[in-house]
Image: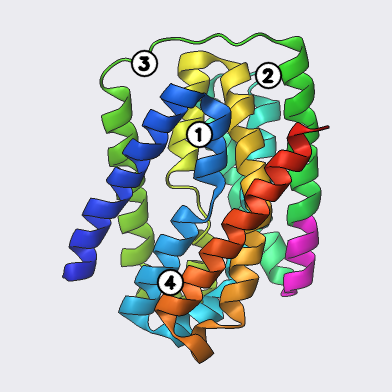
Amino acid sequence: MTAFYLKLLITPTLMLVISLAAKRWGTHIGGLLSGLPITSALVMLFLSLEQGAGFALQAVPGALAGLAAIQATYLFYFLVTRKVGAFIGCITALMAYAATALAISGVGAPLVSIIATLLLVAANIVLTGKEAQTRKANYVALPRWVIPMRMLTATLLLLAITASAEWLGPVISGLLAPIPVIAWPLAVFAHVQGGRYELGAIVRGNAIGAVGVVGFYLALQHSIVQWGVGASLSVAVVLAVLVTVGLARLVRTR
């Protein structure tokens, strides 16, 4: 029961902080923050607390496949919304996520998932960079209901993923672990409110963060049983932050 209340407290609070940061410093910063393994760490934390560290360990290969699928989903959404609206884009992007996740997880090789993730990250960074050079920001002041709606959406997604873990098993739970319960609502709302430039900033920031998430899962895989949940998650998150910050600086200088 304590875990349930933690979900209700932590997830909307993080969404609020990231939304305010995006509002204050721009959607690129919001994308970077949402691209950090916030969702992944929360899901793995609650999977460990509720199902055990062994369950979380078994979920890591699926999570790496899911991470690649998430980047494919962002890429698909970014491309398809050049022709269609946000609603149709969401529906078709989620279908693309399911197909990609099942295809990559079916291979059963974490190395394939990592390579696919890095290739998709590169594609997202390059394409959104080109978009930013040709389009100007179209900032629109957010209505008061937008941030509460983001908080509610993110919380409901996290509750759904963790509540169904025992029924789904570690493989499917792993596939769902990297679902961006914070970044995805942020991206869609940014797109609807601010246009493609704002969407591109979220996608680009999230893609940069995904490289850190790869490090997060690899660190977790090699330490969660030996070190325990708390220490393993802490080290994995720190590694992810360092990788993300370093890559963000490298990309910015180019």
In the rendered structure, which amino acid carries the disc numbered 1? Gly
- The residue that label 3 is drawn on is 142
Q: Give the residue drawn at x 44%, y 85%.
A: 228
The image position of residue 50, as x and y in percent, is: 31, 77
Determine the residue positioned at 80% across, 60% down.
Answer: 115
Which amino acid, by three-letter code, is at mark 3? Answer: Leu
Residue 82 % position (x, y): 68, 19
Q: Residues within 10 Å of mark 1 (few under 14, many from 20)?
A: many
Q: Which residue is mark 4?
A: 168
Q: Earlier in the sequence, mark 2 or mark 1?
A: 1
* Residue corresponding to mark 1: 30
CB under 8 Å between discs 2 and 1: no
Query: In the drawing, does residue 192 fall left or right of residue 167?
Result: right
Q: Pointer 2: what residue?
A: 82
Quadrant hosting residue 217: bottom right
**Which is more toward the observer, 246 or 219?**
246
User: Tag 1's secondary structure?
Assistant: helix
- Considering the numbered disc 4 on the image, is that residue within a helix, a strand or a loop? helix
First along the sequence among labels 1 and 3: 1
Quarter of the C terminus within the rendering = top right
Q: Quick check: marks 2 and 3 in contact, CB under 8 Å?
A: no
Determine if the magenta segment contains residue 110. Answer: yes
SS category of the residue bearing label 2: loop
Query: Distance from label 2 to label 3 (Cα)?
Result: 22 Å
Q: Are marks 1 and 4 in contact (CB under 8 Å)?
A: no
In the picture, measured across the screen, residue 27 lies left or right of residue 6, that is right
Q: CA distance from mark 4 to mark 3?
A: 37 Å
Main SS category, magenta section: helix
- x, y percentage for residue 67? 62, 56
Task: Name the N-terminal-most of marks 4 and 3.
Answer: 3
**Mark sitting earlier along the chain (4/2):** 2
